[in-house]
Image (spheres, rainbow, N blue to C red):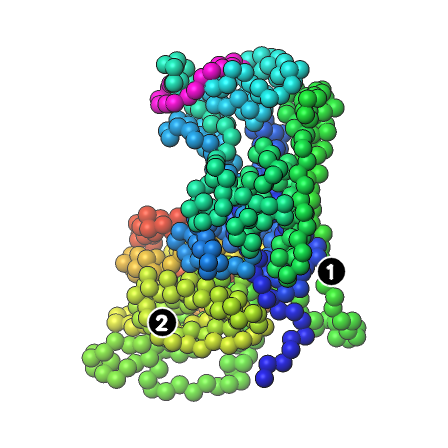
Amino acid sequence: MRRAAAFAPPLRDIVLVGGGHAHVQVVKSFGMKPPPGLRLTIVAREPHTPYSGMLPGHVAGIYDFDDIHIDLARLSAFGGARFVAAEVTGIDLDQRRLHFAGRPSIRYDVASLNTGGVPGEGIASEFVSPVKPIGSFLPRWRRLLRAEPKHIALVGGGAGAVELALAIAGQHPNIGLTLLTDEPDLLPNYPRRARRTLAASLARAGAEVEVGFRAVAADAGVVRAEDGRQLAVDHVLWVTGVDAPSWPAATGLACDESGFVRVNEHLQSVSHPDVFAAGDVASLDGQPRPKSGVYAVREGPVLAENLRRRADGRRLRRYRAQRHALAIIGLGEGRALAVRGRRSVSGAGVWRAKQWIDRRFMHRFDDLPEMAVDLPTLPVALQADVPDEMRCGGCGAKLGADILERVQLRLAVPVSAATERGIGDDAAIIRLPGAAAGGAPRLAASCDAFRAMIDDPYRFGRISAHHALNDLFAMAATPAFALALVTVPLMADAMMEEDLYQLMAGALAVFTEHGVDLVGGHSAEGAELSLGFAVNGYLGGQALEKGGLEAGQRLVLTKPLGTGTLLAGAMRGKTRARHLLAAVDQMDVSNARAAEILLRHGATACTDITGFGFAGHLTEMTRASATGACIELVNLPRLDGALDSLEAGIASSLQPSNELALTDFAIYGYAPNAPLIQLLADPQTAGGLLASLPAEQVADCLTALREAGYSDASAVGEVTGGELEIRA
């Protein structure tokens, strides 16, 4: 009989679709007051949520990227939420599943939509850039500036178009600007005084206005109106209102005539009570309001409370939308215009108020409080032996090399005559019956397992499979079959089933890509989500072992370093989302093609860089080969953010043990605790291959690796006949 848990395990899944202004408040609310029995997941296409009110300030050079973006990975770590970087394409409302392109659907008990709208119907042309979504606009804007445009048109007659035009004019006075609106005037619903103020600001900025101009086409150098008018421009920015995304109505959710999700006074779908919506994607029955981030901000607290209440069966709170929202438009030159209803005021004081309001909102999600962890008080004599309570997942959860070495010496593991290569290399090599006479290939066998290091179980499953197969690729073996060992934490049965499905779907996708049969395994209930595989393959020719280094060869590394510190930072909410996702993408890259390329270019020794770090694995190779090596730090590839993370003192829990390997090296040009030196001991999960090649083959090998997608592949040192060295 199952005993009652001493804590409340997760019993309901709340899934937030989109990282809009309402949802970020939900995540923070859950972090400040974690609800027992509820698990929160946020699914978003972009890992950074832009605060739209600060976009013109960013374009004007007042704010940098991080000033105007909420980091969803860091916020999720604070809120105890799972963060899944993906874009929802539909909902199965009967089965309560969210659908995606290219990955399995996700189950929910309660779902909430805060995705925003999509760009208003515009012109499909390479010469037209929609300003929304902002995440797609900013890279295009940077590319456009590099092309040094002479004249830009902005299609739209609303506050967003006017403010963006004034921001561009202030930062780039050499760019000619024209606003195109199909209305008879800019902002026709604004009070007359406010319109005069805006017109005067545009005139001072040198921006022209064309009214009654319905843009219908744009190509090289020209934008055309419905009435035949033409305007010579280098590019067009589309700054109109938003339309509804198509998929909510297609899935059967009740929507208004424009396709926006109809919600009641509780922000709850009028047709499906387990679905909520807020912000631009929602249409509030009986309380029609313009599409503005101001309303999404006000909806956040009520939405957070109602999601909790729906999940545990309580009565929902009512939301009342304010009748008039305050709009503040930056005018440039340190001034702004405030409009509420029929009243308006402008000046430097309004600009200072806008900056204060915007920065205060962003500060709520940037300066997150440290949540206290209650630990028992230990006697002083025991405190020195307490491990770091923030234990890492992935390869950062491995036991240290020193512990493993001592245990192996104590065990004195016997080896039978069938074992050609046993403990000490990436995979064991077993001679099958008939292999000695050339009648059968040899068997290569390995296993790997670790607890989850990321929130997304599907991506974790993929990375675990890649990691396990890397041992076989490093030995030049062809993987054939795998057995799984899975541990799933105690939850409601439906949630345990879902996590198991996501894990194995990710792993199976990788195994299928590599022609590997998943032939069985074992699952169990445990404290943490973990996954491991025993993998086996065949070796027909010469194995690539650690002991094949030859003096004069060059060392080639196929992937950048830094996953350990970035994953450790993610646990603490310190790693920026863009750096975390870049690390996840690197871990989710197979080494199969890299192994083929290295072998084709004459590699004589190889290993995969995993838990013991670059330095630890290189010392294994040099000891097995009776050689030395010189590492060239200038060529060492590293993930963005890794050195900053180490500089901030963020390191994997395995880092101190790994740094023991650095004592074997003579270090020139750097202090022993410099971040770049520490990076050599950073534990990697699903890391790259490190191989030795004849020097004359390296250039061609690197070209082939980069053409195959290993863009960071680099020659990082030389095999010597002397000592171990690290040089700048």
> Dot 1, how many residues are within 10 Å of its Cα: few (below 14), some (14-19), or many (20+)?
few
Residue extent of the magenta highlight:
207-222
Query: Is label 2 in a helix, a strand or a loop?
Result: strand
Q: Which mark, by number, is residue 372?
A: 1
| Sequence-wise first label, 2 or 1 | 1
Q: Which residue is mark 2?
A: 518
Q: Residue at x 73, y 60 (%)?
A: 372
Quarter location, residue 424: bottom left
In the depicted structure, whether residue 181 falls above or below residue 368: above
Give how far across and how far down residue 363 sits, in percent.
69, 42
Task: Report the front residue among 506 and 696.
Answer: 506
Image point 63% across, 45% down: which residue? 265
Name the residue type under label 1: Ala
Q: CA distance from mark 2 to mark 1?
A: 43 Å
Q: Residue at x 50, y 18 (%)?
A: 183
Vertical comparison of 354 with 616: above or below:
above
